[in-house]
Amino acid sequence: MNQNGSEPRKHTIAVLVENKFGVLSRVAGLFSARGYNIESLSVGETLDPSMSRMTLVVRGDEFVIEQVTKQLHKLIDVIKVSDLTEENHVEREMILVRVNAEPAYRAEILRIADIFRAKVVDVTPLTYTLEATGEESKTVALLDLLRPFGIKELVRTGKIAIARSPKTKVRKVEERVGKAREAIKDPVKEQKITGFVD
Amino acid sequence: MKLSGARIFLECLKREGVDVVFGLPGGAVLPVYDALYDFRGLTHILVRQEAGAGHAAEGYARVSGKVGVALVTSGPAATNLVTALQDAYMDSIPIVAFTGQVPTHLIGNDAFQEADNVGITRSCTKHNFLVKDPRDMAETIKEAFYIAGTGRPGPVHVDLPKDVLLKEAEFHYPEKVHLRSYNPTYEGHPGQIKRAAQTIFRAKRPVLYVGGGVISSDAAPELLALADLTQIPVTTTVMALGAFPSDHLLSMGMLGMHGSYWANMAVYNSDCLIAVGARFDDRVTGKIEHFSPNSEIIHIDIDPSSISKNIKVHIPIVGDAKRVLARLVQEMAQEQGGQLPDIQRAIREQWLRQIAEWRQKHPFQYDWDDQVIKPQYVMEEISNLIRGEALVVTGVGQHQMWAAQYVKFKHPRHWCTSGGLGTMGYGLPAALGAQAAFPNKLVVNIDGDGSFVMNSQELATLVEHQLPVKTVIINNGYHGMVRQWQEIIYGGRFCAIDLSASPDFVKLADAYGCVGIRATKPSEVVPALEKAFATPGPVVIDMVVDREECVFPMVPAGGANKDMILTHPNKEQKAKAAKSQTGF
């Protein structure tokens, strides 16, 4: 039903659910029943033990995602659904990868690990097992670099995501920093401050 | 006061206003039946197969507006109920189904008559529960009834393990139930309603497309008010027959695959389609690109996920049909300034004249035969005799479509059929349920010879409880609808449709203790119907009809509604139909 002609994209959706048995099965069942593919799924309790939070990655066009969101809302155990894809958000996933590490390549692999701030969690004479966390683009890049050596085993967690804090706070910092800059007559004051996480 | 889980269960049902339960006992639910032995205030109707309990609950719910209740045991009983649950899910019928389950410590152990009940019904119910502690029983049951009967109604399944039924607990019936994650929207957005009113006012060729949601919401009076005020013609889906009086000048009857020519043409040529409580099902839309292609679509529905699911909607309004229509009537009255202004009136009359022309061009028709009964004739005579006052239930197939086309309706909740799932065998048990809801009304079950045998065992239930359902079997000795498709779309390659080896229905009725009547000639039809309606107790009429009649108009699956096949197609039309067949 591609009436609006938008391209299928990956969407990261956060779902707040009742922490009751069978909820995971309901959500998974909803997707499988309608033929939507869950690319990754991660779930855990929130601060309130009666609620859990799920992070789903689904591929689809605007129309499919609209249906997915509506169908999720329809489930009695679903409390809130947010599509984080369009908002500013932070996402992370963790991978554990066991890579071939013959004597000739060991140094190179360790260098790559260092660049990506990955940790070595297991060592054998012929392999290294690395642990890495980061955005999907980072883990994909790491795996691309390791692939030529021969990846023996790969385990990924689902993606987790959290929205960035609301913009009003950024504006207030802009004002404060702007005023401070005025006071010291800094030529840099002309520059726009876009955020305080660089 | 400490009561056993089973006793708490019965007390809860009573407090929910349940007066009839359709059920079948078994090992896992024996505690309930033991408590039922000396329990006042609940009638239990023993069905002969669990699907009968499910469909009876559906029929009961559809005609009465209350939540239907079914009670069956564990294992095979629960799985037998699945069809009825899926049927209620598709047609949004409020029922609560209670199934027994093996004791909690045996769950997952492959115990005797064990099945993963909640696992199996997860996808065919609005929600389901497994009660693990008798202290949770009252709250769970209250939640179950609340979920079933509110928002978009639907089936709820509650699984009751045997040890939970035996254990005792304090009984407190909760005053209120609050689900933080379930808040249906009832009031439509006032801005959207105003936009809709303005759009309707400007429209030159508006059509009201009405679905089962209008019945669920009891919105027939508001619909009538809107149609009268704005002079907009009304077409209904198969689920909404009766929502608008059939003999009203603005009534166009059913639309869709076997709908009327004029209803389909009106929708196709419309410039403003007002959908109320309908879900743009594929049987209604035909080829999506050709469904009302030039209209602005206003969609009023309580379920946001139904809106813009198949067809992009221009003005969505999420809300309860009754309330939104009432608001819309007010807004329209404001737009129009009271009655329809003269210019508008002239435009409407032109549109209505066009629809009347289409109706004259291709009315519902069939060829008369003096020797062989035509099924359409049977429908006409049934309609003449009941005059809109009886409750009509159907099975699924050609007879269902002819009933929808030819029977005239006056009131809502007088028509009960399996629309979304199309469950053969729905007729007799649903009629049972309808009769249980209204023991003094005439209930007519229009069934097919294929559908009837799927749940014919419920004749015993009718006799036991003296439920005087009148079943009319449209007996053509075939799986008629399948035969029609094989004839028109599959080039006459008939396969697995012959039902000549059927029981003698008169003898079958007699065997169960019902009155059986047979009619084989057109002259016998009216006497048979009159005799049946006048005879006390359940009656079965074996109407032996023309074996090869087809339902027309017909839109082949995947075809556009405007390309209806109106009479027996010639070779070219059959070839075209075969090509347009996109699988379903």
Image: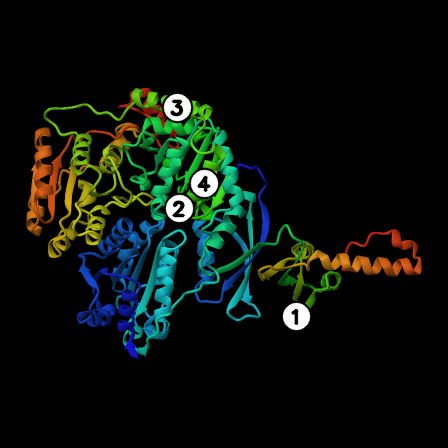
Is A21 left or right of B434, judged from the image as shown?
right
Asked if badge 1 and badge 4 are on a common chain, one would say no
Here the colouring is rainbow
Disc 1 and disc 4: Cα gap in Å? 71 Å
Marks 3 and 4, the one that precedes in the sequence:
4
Query: Where residue B310 appears, x then y in whole percent?
Result: 46, 40
Question: Who is closer to the viewer here, B371 or B259?
Answer: B259
Mark 1 and mark 4 residues within 8 Å of each other at the beta carbon:
no
Marks 3 and 2, the one that precedes in the sequence:
2
Asked if badge 3 and badge 2 are on a common chain, one would say yes
Q: Which residue is identified by label 1?
A: A121
In front of the other: label 3 or label 1?
A: 3
Question: Who is closer to the viewer here, B288 or B525?
Answer: B525
In front of the other: label 1 or label 4?
A: 4
Disc 3 and disc 2: Cα gap in Å? 27 Å
Q: Which residue is identified by label 3?
A: B349
Mark 4: few, some, or many residues within 10 Å (few <14, many ≥20)? Answer: some
Mark 1 and mark 2 residues within 8 Å of each other at the beta carbon:
no
Marks 2 and 4, the one that precedes in the sequence:
2
Q: Which residue: 66% across, 63% down?
A: A133
Q: Which residue is identified by label 2?
A: B322
Tell me, for residue B389, which label it has, or none: none
Q: Which residue: 11% across, 39% down?
A: B542
Mark 3 and mark 4 residues within 8 Å of each other at the beta carbon:
no
Q: Secondary structure at mark 3?
A: helix
Disc 1 and disc 2: Cα gap in Å? 64 Å
